[in-house]
Amino acid sequence: MTHHHNTGPAIVTRGLTRHFTSRKQTVEAVKGLDLEIGQGELVAFLGPNGAGKSTTLRMLTTLIPPTSGSASVAGHDVVTGQRDVRRAIGYVGQGNGAGHQQRGRDELISQGRAHGLSRRDAHRRAEELIADLDLGAVADRKVSTLSGGQRRRLDIAMGLVHLPRVLFLDEPSTGLDPQNRANLQSIVQRLHAQTGSTIVLTTHYLEEADAIADRVIVIDHGLVIADDTASRLKSGLGDLVRLGFGTSEASATAAARAGRVPGARVEHDSTQVSIRVAGGSELVAELIGDLAALGAPVARVEVQRPTLDDVFLDLTGRSLREAHAAETPQTDTTPAAGEKSEVAA
Ligand SMILES: Nc1ncnc2c1ncn2[C@@H]1O[C@H](COP(=O)(O)OP(=O)(O)OP(=O)(O)O)[C@@H](O)[C@H]1O
């Protein structure tokens, strides 16, 4: 069940910008994004708290208008084609809501009816989604009794009722324990494989972006700072090779030798040399041999493959984990006029 109605990109943004004014201070939440996302891509927006991920998603889903620039989703402009965008997308926000006293199955059926499905089709669609999102065991329970992970899966099912061509998930796995998070990630991947629809999710979990996204768009302070596959982002940074030595002379000799490796970034102190270089693990054997011949025998070796956190650290000078922990989400802000908490049916 693929449903691509046009052949252009799923999402295009040009200079997409959003400012907020709160207590007379202007926050530039998103500062001129130029993005193109193809149909069928599974993309993660990765960045710390306050990076502008949710604001970007809220503009793309027509919940808030851009301050300047433009965006189109499924071929429709988010401002002039708001209705068409809403019909083409599914959006699962942070803490969306099915009604608490309803049964999950009934919520899905009502949602289908709200999207114009016949009674029979709404029932059929609900059954499909219950199966696709592993909700069979809990679909007849009141929503208020579901666990966090079950609730999140129901929210995603709600967002999928009308077979959207582009699905937006805002921090789908935040607040879930590792097992439920892994479960949710495999469901998202399965949905993507089954439907071929475009999926854009935001996350501040490196492992999540790494594990499930075809493409990782790293956002910091409202700007795209990297955009590639996780494996290319990591291999671009290179491996980290650490060599330990018994004497400071040996360490200095090794640093000089390592400095001649093309593209290597070298740091050293009296006992250790750190070399950041592409293909470091392949290089290390040769280096150890050379250093032995130069009278600087290597006492310890460690090779680290880079993580996306290393990529972020390299780009920003901050660790994503720390950047995330350091920023506390602001409360007490002034929502923009016309803002709503959910996409209207
Ligand atoms: N309604 C608002 N009024 C004022 N400032 C806002 C508003 N919404 C967002 N901001 C600010 O814009 C910046 C970007 O916020 P945004 O929610 O887009 O970040 P995020 O990357 O999604 O972070 P999180 O992981 O916490 O959701 C932050 O500085 C935030 O405080």
Image: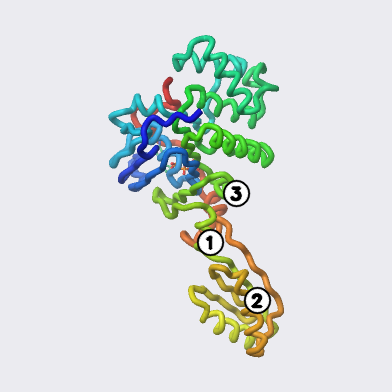
**Nearer the camera: disc 1 or disc 3:** 1
The 10 Å Cα crowd at callout 1, few under 14, some 14 to 19, many 20 or more, is some
Distance CA(mark 2)–CA(mark 1): 19 Å
Q: Ligand 1 lies in which image quarter?
A: top left
The 10 Å Cα crowd at callout 2, few under 14, some 14 to 19, many 20 or more, is few
**Nearer the camera: disc 2 or disc 3:** 2
The residue identified by callout 2 is 285
Residue type, numbered disc 1 = Ser
Sequence-earlier tag: 2 or 1? 1
Sequence-earlier tag: 2 or 3? 3
Residue at (60, 49) in percent of width and height: 207
Residue type, numbered disc 3 = Glu
Residue at (37, 46) in percent of width and height: 35
Task: Please tell me which residue lies in front, 273 or 198.
Answer: 198
The residue identified by callout 3 is 207
* Protein image colouring: rainbow
Q: Do the numbered discs 2 and 3 sit on residues whose CB atoms are within 8 Å?
A: no
